[in-house]
Structure formats: C-alpha cells, structure tokens
Amino acid sequence: MRKTAIATALTFAIVGGLAAATPAMSASGTRLNVPADKWMSPAELKANLKDQGYDVREIETDDGAYEVEMTDKDGTHIEAYIHPETGEILKNYDD
C-alpha cells in the first residue's frame, strides 16, 4: 500500500512539473517559441495595428505573445494576443 501512495505522489509531482514547464500554446496547439531577437518592437507593433485601424492603449508580453488592449474604429474595446514576430492577431489563443 505504501509503494502505491509513493508512486501516486511521484506521478502527480512529475505531471505538475511538466504542466508548469509547458510553453504557451494557441487553441490549435501551436506553440509560440519565437526567439527574442525575432520579436517586433512594441513601437513596430503599435504602428502595424494603427495601420489596421486600431488605437492601441496598452502592450504587454504574456506567455510568449504580446497582449494588447486596443479599440477599433467603432470604439469597441478589444483585448487580443498578437504573434510577436508577424503581428498577426491570434484568434482563440489560450494563455
């Protein structure tokens, strides 16, 4: 019985450690492992989004992507994750 309890505890510890170490993934399962030197700067990202008609309020980084608060041309508040290299809005991104 004691061996089973130890094995169970060890299994939970390993699984928990793997879950904590797993990189961010989109809903499609694609990992964002973009090297830092490939990221567009926040200023480039802001200009890119402005060209698309968005008014950027705040840019942060979160789990390998940009997290942006912005409004569209109609004034609708949008919180979106943006691919750090391409500037693409990530739909259904799971942070």
Image (spheres, rainbow, N blue to C red):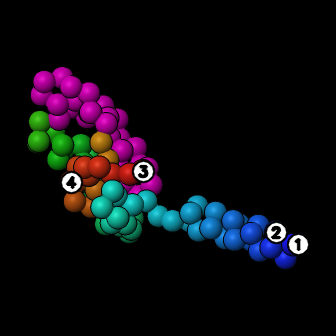
Residue 29's image quarter? bottom left
Badge 4: few (under 14), some or many (20 or more) residues near its Cα, within 10 Å? few
- Of helix, strand and loop, which mostly describes the magenta segment? strand
Name the foreground residue: 91 vs 15. 15
Q: Residue at x 26, y 27 (%)?
A: 77
> Which residues fall within the magenta stretch?
54-79
**Location of residue 70 in the rendering, given as x and y in whole percent from the top left corner:** 26, 33
Q: Is residue 57 above or below residue 15?
A: above
Q: Inspect the image, locate mark 1, and give the three-letter code of the amino acid beneath it.
A: Arg
Q: Residue at x 88, y 72 (%)?
A: 2
Q: CA distance from mark 3 to mark 2?
A: 33 Å
Sooner in the amino-acid sequence: mark 1 or mark 4? 1
Q: Nearer the viewer, mark 1 or mark 4?
A: 1
Badge 3 element? loop
- Disc 4 target residue: 88
Sooner in the amino-acid sequence: mark 4 or mark 3? 4
Q: Does the CB distance between marks 1 and 2 fall below 8 Å?
A: yes
- Disc 3 target residue: 95
Q: Nearer the viewer, mark 3 or mark 1?
A: 1
Q: Inspect the image, locate mark 2, and give the three-letter code of the amino acid beneath it.
A: Ala
- Disc 1 target residue: 2
**Location of residue 7 in the rendering, given as x and y in whole percent from the top left corner:** 77, 74
Q: Does the CB distance between marks 4 and 2 fall below 8 Å?
A: no
Sooner in the amino-acid sequence: mark 3 or mark 1? 1
Q: CA distance from mark 1 to mark 2?
A: 5 Å
